[in-house]
């Protein structure tokens, strides 16, 4: 990277921001041209902003697998294809979905043609690559399983490259000097680290007069998919912000970061200001403001994070940094369905190794641990994973401890979270609140750091528990008038 680029970007007082737009918001990117990208700015005021974009809504699900339902996409179809090209039909459907997505945001016929050509080049290139790989792996010396991680990376990059290209075309039509910055490594034979990839692709970019539109996926030797899977775009975004020493990193979502899930609670409040510590607790509870690894990068680089509503650009949103709370208080109530995996054995008392064996089984099956408790002869892990994964863990533990009693129960956790819960009596007041709401309390946990309190309830009671706790610690809290739209 030229020295001029280092001076214009890598200085603490340069004032530039790195901003990310999520997939759901990307599907409405044409609405953001006048509000977010321009937003009353003109001339040089438009610039000193780097945008990292996700694929259009639903495209990555079609390329890999549906994030929630697990419905297979191109990746799964290719992995399961012993012979034939049935996966190719999936890829054709992705191409059609991409064309539908960019036709919905591009009005100019010439721009649509450019986008059509881009999709054709990338999709057919990927198709030919997969056909060649399938043919090579038909010989005994080659194993398809050895290449699946690379295929997952290749497919992931298609969605972000498409959305970044289309966005840059859209913005240039609106007289914004947008530059398509492709980190996906398409047809690039060089091997680069993530930092090298970012530096190389930003070479020659003048932030004072250009707006880089950057792919959320970056091809690199670290292997973002292998390390972070579907959280790769936030890792790219965070590393870009940290590497260029951005004044602020901003994530534009289709909603505000609120005091509860608006689908569960009607009277939610915008947080306004919170900490990376709280963001970590939210990630643990499935309400991810940002991928934990991405948050770590920003935290270590001293870059504050702002979460905004993309469609309310005049609202400053919620700032996440390291500043302590001005006063103690509860900020958010989160809820998550879990499985309680309980192992009880009388011989456990005074014997080491039980916990390590359980953790090894959970790690081996990629099961996310939300919380755990233990006593003399029982260890319970509250796990966020599919039931089939839990059953595999249970099977492994039954073999390791044939005399143990192992129980699996579907439950939920309602958690009260805040930067500083000291003096709030969140545990005792929460227990009383849930009792008065006639909600059965299976268990309750609070650690000494005063950041969160977890209430374990029956699965059918989760929504009512979240609403009751939110009413107690947020809606009835003195001076809390920060309503979210």
Image (cartoon, helix red, strand yellow):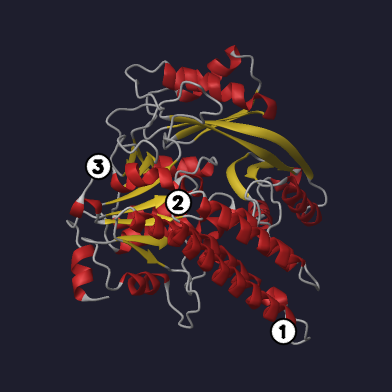
Quadrant where the C terminus sits is top left
Query: Which mark sits nearer the N-terminus, 2 or 3?
Result: 3
Name the secondary structure under disc 1. helix
Q: Which mark is in front, 2 or 1?
A: 2
For mark 2, what is the residue?
Answer: 107
Query: Which mark sits nearer the N-terminus, 3 or 1?
Result: 3
Asked if the residues shown at circle 2 and circle 3 are in contact, with their CB atoms under 8 angstroms apart, the answer is: no
Q: Please state the horizontal and vertical placement of residue 239, each as a whole percent of the image.
A: 38, 61
Could you tell me how far apart the alpha carbons at marks 2 and 3 are, in whole angstroms?
Answer: 22 Å
Q: Please state the horizontal and vertical placement of residue 86, each as a whole percent of the image.
A: 77, 66
Q: Which mark is in front, 3 or 1?
A: 3
Residue at the spot 59% in from the left edge and 75% down from the top edge: 125
Query: Which mark sits nearer the N-terminus, 2 or 1?
Result: 2
Q: Is residue 10 visible?
A: no
Q: Is residue 379 left or right of residue 4?
A: right
For mark 3, what is the residue?
Answer: 40
Few, some or many residues within 10 Å of mark 2 (<14, 14–19, 20+) = few
For mark 1, what is the residue?
Answer: 136
Name the secondary structure under disc 2. loop
Q: Say which quarter of the image contains residue 258.
A: top left
Q: Please state the horizontal and vertical placement of residue 128, each as a whole percent of the image.
A: 65, 77
Residue at the spot 45% in from the left edge and 51% down from the top edge: 107
Q: Is residue 129 visible?
A: yes
Q: Please state the horizontal and vertical placement of residue 167, each as a whole percent of the image.
A: 42, 56
Q: Say which quarter of the image contains residue 324.
A: top left
Could you tell me how far apart the alpha carbons at marks 3 and 1 are, in whole angstroms?
Answer: 55 Å
Q: Which mark is in front, 2 or 3?
A: 2
Residue at the spot 73% in from the left edge and 52% down from the top edge: 393
């Amino acid at each position: 990277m030229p020295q001029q680029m280092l001076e214009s970007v890598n200085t603490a007082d340069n004032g530039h921001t790195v901003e990310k737009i999520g997939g759901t918001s990307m599907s409405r990117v044409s609405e953001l041209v006048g509000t977010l990208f321009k937003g009353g700015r003109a001339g040089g005021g438009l610039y000193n902003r780097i945008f990292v974009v996700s694929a259009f809504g639903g495209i990555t699900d079609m390329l890999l697998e549906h994030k929630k339902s697990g419905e297979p996409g191109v990746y799964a179809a290719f992995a399961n294809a012993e012979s034939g090209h049935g996966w190719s039909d999936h890829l054709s459907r992705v191409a059609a979905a991409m064309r539908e997505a960019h036709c919905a945001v591009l009005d100019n016929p010439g721009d649509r043609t450019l986008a059509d050509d881009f999709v054709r080049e990338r999709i057919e290139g990927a198709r030919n690559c997969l056909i060649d790989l399938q043919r090579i792996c038909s010989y005994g010396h080659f194993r398809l399983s050895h290449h699946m991680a690379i295929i997952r990376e290749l497919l992931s990059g298609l969605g972000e490259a498409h959305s970044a290209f289309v966005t840059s075309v859209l913005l240039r039509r609106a007289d914004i000097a947008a530059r398509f910055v492709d980190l996906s490594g398409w047809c690039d034979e060089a091997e680069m680290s993530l930092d090298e990839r970012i530096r190389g692709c930003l070479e020659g970019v003048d932030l004072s007069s250009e707006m880089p539109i950057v792919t959320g996926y970056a091809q690199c030797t670290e292997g973002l998919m292998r390390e972070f899977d579907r959280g790769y775009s936030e890792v790219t975004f965070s590393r870009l912000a940290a590497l260029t020493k951005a004044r602020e990193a901003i994530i534009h979502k289709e909603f505000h970061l609120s005091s509860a899930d608006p689908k569960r609670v009607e009277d939610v409040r915008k947080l306004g200001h919170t900490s990376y510590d709280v963001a970590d607790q939210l990630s643990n509870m499935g309400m991810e403001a940002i991928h934990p690894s991405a948050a770590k990068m920003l935290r270590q680089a001293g870059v504050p994070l702002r979460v905004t509503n993309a469609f309310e650009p005049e609202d400053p949103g919620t700032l996440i940094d390291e500043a302590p709370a001005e006063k103690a208080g509860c900020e958010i109530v989160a809820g998550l369905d879990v499985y309680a995996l309980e192992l009880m054995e009388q011989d456990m008392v005074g014997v080491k190794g039980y916990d390590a064996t359980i953790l090894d089984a959970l790690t081996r099956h990629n099961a996310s641990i939300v919380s755990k408790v233990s006593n003399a002869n029982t260890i319970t892990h509250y796990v966020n994973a599919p039931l089939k994964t839990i059953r595999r863990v249970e099977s492994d533990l039954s073999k390791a401890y044939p005399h143990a009693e192992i129980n699996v129960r579907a439950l939920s956790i309602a958690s009260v979270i805040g930067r500083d819960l000291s003096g709030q009596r969140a545990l005792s007041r929460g227990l009383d609140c849930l009792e008065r709401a006639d909600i059965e309390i299976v268990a309750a946990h609070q650690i000494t750091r005063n950041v969160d309190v977890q209430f374990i309830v029956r699965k059918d009671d989760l929504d009512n528990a979240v609403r009751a706790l939110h009413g107690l610690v947020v809606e009835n809290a003195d001076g809390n008038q920060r309503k979210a739209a």
